[in-house]
Image (tube, rainbow, N blue to C red):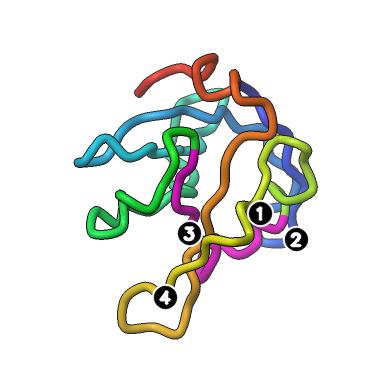
């Protein structure tokens, strides 16, 4: 799936491919790569095995902080994801909250290329 994201500098307007994978525990991993050369751009998910039992089959943990901030802000503008607001967890040593998202269309995950 190709995404056109418009972000603030230093990123600007980019065309990226969304790919799926899996983490240990079979949790969903989602990565963005450059459409031209496949260079990794960002991993938008994070794996938290100790909380996997709290996810539904179509849900995944999203890294919304640090370098992912501008990317997540651009992704929120798309009608591709839905935040599962009732599920936020504190994570790691930092004062951040891990959000749980799912695809707006439940068939989207099955349509993504695996890598």
Residue wearing tag 1: 11
Residue wearing tag 2: 8
Q: For the point 61% across and 52% down, which residue is it? A: 84
Mark 3 or mark 1: name the one nearer the start of the chain. Answer: 1
User: Disc 1 vs disc 4: which is toward the camera?
Assistant: 4
Q: Are marks 4 and 3 in contact (CB under 8 Å)?
A: no
- Element type where label 1 sits in the image: loop
Q: Residues within 10 Å of mark 2 (few under 14, many from 20)?
A: few
The stretch in magenta equals 59-73
Q: Residues within 10 Å of mark 4 (few under 14, many from 20)?
A: few
User: Disc 3 vs disc 2: which is toward the camera?
Assistant: 3
Q: Are marks 1 and 2 in contact (CB under 8 Å)?
A: yes
- How much space separates mark 1 and mark 4, taking CA atoms? 28 Å
- How much space separates mark 1 and mark 2, taking CA atoms? 6 Å
Q: Are marks 3 and 1 in contact (CB under 8 Å)?
A: no
Q: Which mark is residue 90?
A: 4
Quarter of the rendering occupied by the N terminus = top right
- Element type where label 2 sits in the image: loop
Residue 4 place in picture, x, y as percent = 73, 34
Q: For the point 31% across and 50% down, which residue is it? A: 52
Residue 89 place in picture, x, y as percent = 44, 69
On whether residue 66 falls in the magenta region, the answer is yes
Task: Name above or below for residue 67 compared with residue 53.
Answer: below
Mark 3 or mark 2: name the one nearer the start of the chain. Answer: 2
Q: Viewed as shown, does residue 28 lie left or right of 75? A: left
């Amino acid at each position: 799936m190709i995404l056109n994201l418009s972000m603030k500098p230093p990123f600007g307007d980019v065309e990226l491919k969304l790919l799926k994978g899996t983490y240990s525990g079979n949790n969903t991993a989602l990565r963005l790569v450059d459409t031209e050369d496949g260079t990794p751009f960002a991993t938008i998910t994070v794996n938290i095995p100790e909380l996997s039992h709290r996810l539904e089959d179509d849900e995944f943990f999203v890294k919304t902080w640090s370098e992912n901030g501008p990317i997540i802000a651009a992704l929120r503008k798309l009608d591709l994801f839905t935040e599962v607001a009732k599920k936020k967890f504190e994570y790691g040593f930092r004062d951040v909250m891990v959000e749980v998202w799912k695809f707006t269309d439940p068939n989207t995950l099955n349509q993504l290329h695996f890598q």
